[in-house]
Structure formats: structure tokens, C-alpha cells
Image (spheres, rainbow, N blue to C red):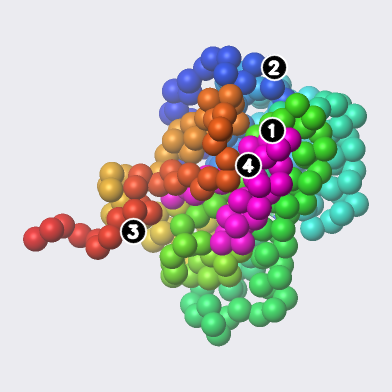
Amino acid sequence: MAASEGWNMPTGELMKGKKGLIMGVANANSIAWGIASQLAAQGAELAFTYLGEGLERRVRPLAESVGARLLIQADVTDDASMDAAFAELEKEFGTIDFVVHSVAFANKDELKGSFVENTSRDSFLLAMNISAFSFVDVAKRASKLMPNGGSMITMTYLGSERAIPNYNTMGVAKAALEAATRYIARDLGPKGIRVNAISAGAMRTLSLAGISGGRGMISQGRAMSAMKEDTSMEGVAGAALWLCSDLGLSTTGEVVHVDAGFHMMGLAGDEE
Ligand code: NAD
């Protein structure tokens, strides 16, 4: 189900007067789109980046539906494209108040089987570059547009803390991303910029489809969760709203789990 379907999104003014950048919408199922919809419903003014022309036809109607006045192509592995994207953002918005980094990639043939056997140097570094370093780079660029402080969030998964079948290289990249979140939070804290990660349970998106047994991550995650239910886009977007708005004041360097309690369970199954 697309992020905005069947979801009674709370509207209001928590983000009124705030401007920000959303990175990582590929289609209506993207977590970034769920978050963007919620932030817009609370009055945020949004700019979007998307990867490559092929995605523009999907992202443009979504961005236009929430009145975004800026849609920019940006590849996080390409400095020239990032320079151009942030120059355009600065020209159009001047300053910003928040950034949502919802970007990750690893080669499909490494997201299966043995981590030890299947991990090559090039693919490992690619996953680290796109999924972890990019947040450091985005934080550096975005912080220059936040003279009055702000909030940055990124998306992670429990595979950073636990060895999850098939998640492999991406789990290592997410561990780096979470550590980077703390270091960025430490550096930018004195500037009034808060930096946090949301650790979401498995959700049906394009990225999940690239992981061998991705559907099993959803069904097993549900079965092993405290609440015995799927992670909802509402919950993830609600956490993003908390962290991006002034409700999140004083929270920084945190990894917030939004996974129906999957992360804290011990043994699976019933007591008897
Ligand atoms: P998605 O495929 O919709 O989003 C991933 C985005 O990353 C896409 O928009 C893609 O274009 C972008 N991207 C990839 N390489 C890029 C590059 N070089 N430059 C710029 N953008 C690039 O899938 P999603 O599930 O919404 O993923 C968003 C984030 O949430 C990712 O960090 C993912 O790891 C994380 N996450 C996903 C789940 C899940 O189960 N779906 C759970 C926890 C965390």
C-alpha cells in the first residue's frame, strides 16, 4: 500500500514556517515519501532530490501533490551533482530547518547467502559510500544552510546491531551510519542542530525487494515483534515528525526504534 493510502494523517501546524529537504523518494512506497507526506500535512515546505531521470516521472507528481517548489536530481556518489543540488537548494530556500536522508544501496548479489563468502571489496565500499558516508556529506552541506539550528534524520535497520540473514553488507553499512549519526550529532550540537536515526522494522519498498528473502524479513519481524504486527508507515512518519519538529528539542544522537518492539525481544515464541 502506498504511504498515503488508508492513512488518516494527522494534520496541523507543527512544521509551519519550516523548510527542508527530502532525499530518497523513489516511488509512493518509499519511506521518504511517507515522511514527506506527514511533514507536509503539518505545514512544512519541502524540496526533494531524486536519483536519475528514470525516477523523475514517479517523484514529480508526488512532490507536486504536496506543493513542493523544488525537485532536484542528485546522486550522492557524485560530488558535482551534490554541489549543484545544494547550490540550487540554497538559491531557492536560502536556509533550511531539516533534512531527511533516506538513501541506501548495496549490490543485490551481496544481499544473500554468506556474508563472508559473498562480500567483495568494491561492493562493500559502494554500500558504505551510498548508505553511510553520504549522510556525513549531506550533514556537512546541509549544516551550512542551518544558521538557526535544525534537525537531520536518517533511516536505519536492526541489521546494524544483530546479524540478520541476507542483510550482510548493508548491516555493516547501517552500523557505520548509526555511529556517524552520533559523531555528526556531537559536532553539530553546539550549532543547535539535532541529528538522529530512525531504526524502522522491515517494510515493503523497492529497497526491501532487493534483499533475498525480504518478505521473510517482514513476516518474521512481525512474528518476533512484541506487538505481533507490521511496522506502519504512520509510526515511522510520526517519529520523523517528532524529531524534525520542535517536539524533538533536546533529543540528539539517538537511534529510535520504530519496529513494533522487534528490536528488544529475546527468545521467539510463546512461554510454554
Ligand atoms: P526506497 O528504495 O524507496 O528508497 C531508497 C532510496 O535511495 C531511493 O529513492 C533511491 O533512489 C535512493 N538512492 C540509492 N542510491 C542513491 C544514490 N547514489 N544517490 C541518491 N539516492 C540514492 O526504499 P526505502 O525502504 O524507502 O529505503 C529508504 C531508507 O530506509 C534506506 O536507508 C533503507 O535502508 C531504510 N530502511 C528501510 C527499511 C525497509 O524495510 N524498507 C527498514 C529500515 C530502514
Earlier along the polypeptide chain: callout 2 or callout 1? 2
Asked which secondary structure carries label 3, the reply is: helix
Residue 107 drawn at (x, y percent): 64, 68
The amino acid beneath tag 3 is Gln
Q: Earlier in the sequence, mark 1 or mark 3?
A: 1
The residue lying toward the viewer, choosing from 66 and 44, is: 44
Dot 4 surroundings within 10 Å: few (below 14), some, or many (20 or more)? many
Which three-letter amino acid code belongs to the residue tagged 1? Gly
Q: CA distance from mark 3 to mark 4?
A: 30 Å
Q: Earlier in the sequence, mark 2 or mark 3?
A: 2
Q: Is mark 4 within 8 Å of ligand 1?
A: no
- The crowding category of the residue bearing disc 2, from other C-alpha atoms within 10 Å (few below 14, some 14 to 19, many at least 20), is few
> 10 Å neighbourhood of mark 1: few (<14), some, or many (≥20)?
some
| Number of the front mark, 2 or 1 | 1
Query: Is 54 a magenta residue?
Result: no
Tell me whether the residue at label 4 lies in contact with that at label 2, contact meaning CB atoms closer than 8 angstroms: no
Give the structural element (helix, strand or loop) at label 4: strand
The residue beneath circle 3 is 220
**Residue closest to the far bottom:** 117
Which residue is identified by label 2? 17
Q: Which residue is mark 1?
A: 192
Q: CA distance from mark 2 to mark 3?
A: 41 Å
Asked whether residue 199 is in view, the answer is yes
